[in-house]
Image: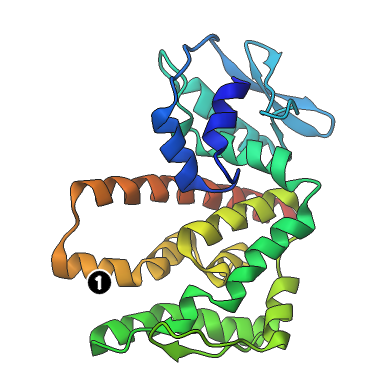
Amino acid sequence: MRDLFDEVAGKSPLDPNEAVRRTSRAQLPKRFYTEAGVAEDNGGFAVRLDGRAVKTPSRNALAAPDRALAEAIAAEWQAQGETIDPSTMPLTRLANSVIDGVAGRIDAVTDDIAKYFGSDLLFYRAEHPEELIAREGAHWDPVLFWAKDALGAHFILAQGIVHVGQPETALAAARAALPGDPWLLGALHVVTTITGSALLALALAHGRLEADQVWAAAHVDEDWNIEQWGLDEEAAARRAAKQAEFAAVAQVIAALGSRRS
């Protein structure tokens, strides 16, 4: 099991696209257990397979800080058929990444997310047509106004793809709003990677946007192109995989955000 999830982790344990690609090349192991469940352990909630502990690729206990979240992870294991397919287990992969790759590396992961604040998706606007410009503004401007008013982060916008430098004060204010909790931070890293926007990830974590609003905002340009040209089967499959990954991490953010409120 360790080898399988090592392979699935890919070059970056928090890159969902690489995880799915590598899963498709891995030989899937046979299911070796009957029942997946959860047991309270060391202040958290550990996943159990037929009563036995499950380990991450780095041999740490597979556990979550919230019972409902641990039960959702166990449900992924319970839902497996004759083989175990990690591409259908986004919560498990996130848990492995958080436990092995985020806890103990909070500053490094925070820095990785914060890089997006320098070139966030929301800063770069279409030059035409007018309808697309209006759609981007409708989805993106409220997040930028929120960042300015709630976080003190005032960013500069540009049309086209030419890079525009952002004020250091805005970058620092946005970075300071990132959570220190490894689970939330790991989930935000995945949202940032999927959407191309650390600001959308922050808006989700702080309750400014709901998950479906974040997904829609992240895909304004893509949805526009689909309306004009359609969507081929391969692109649709990639989008569906990304959306499943996104839904899983949004579930984590909702569960832990509710627990801390």
* Residue nearest the observer in this picture, 33 or 26: 26
Say left or right for 42 vs 35. Answer: right
Say left or right for 72 vs 181. Answer: left
What amino acid type should be assigned to the residue bearing mark 1?
Trp
Query: What kind of element bears circle 1?
Result: helix
Quadrant for residue 140, please give it: bottom left
- The type of colouring in the image is rainbow
Considering every residue shown, the one lying at the far left of the view is: 229
Q: Can you see residue 261? A: no
Q: Is residue 33 above or below residue 143?
A: above
Quarter of the picture containing the C terminus is bottom right
On the image, numbered disc 1 is attached to which residue? 224
Quadrant for residue 108, please give it: bottom right
Quarter of the picture containing the N terminus is top right
Image coords of residue 129 (percent x, y): 23, 87
Mark 1 Cα shell of 10 Å, populated few (<14), some (14-19), many (≥20): some
x 45%, y 90%: residue: 158
Image coords of residue 225 (percent x, y): 23, 69
Image coords of residue 43 (percent x, y): 83, 34
x 72%, y 80%: residue: 173
* Residue nearest the observer in this picture, 185 or 24: 24
Considering every residue shown, the one lying at the far right of the view is: 42
Q: Can you see residue 197? A: yes
Quadrant for residue 220, please give it: bottom left
x 16%, y 61%: residue: 230
Image coords of residue 35 (percent x, y): 56, 13
x 71%, y 86%: residue: 168
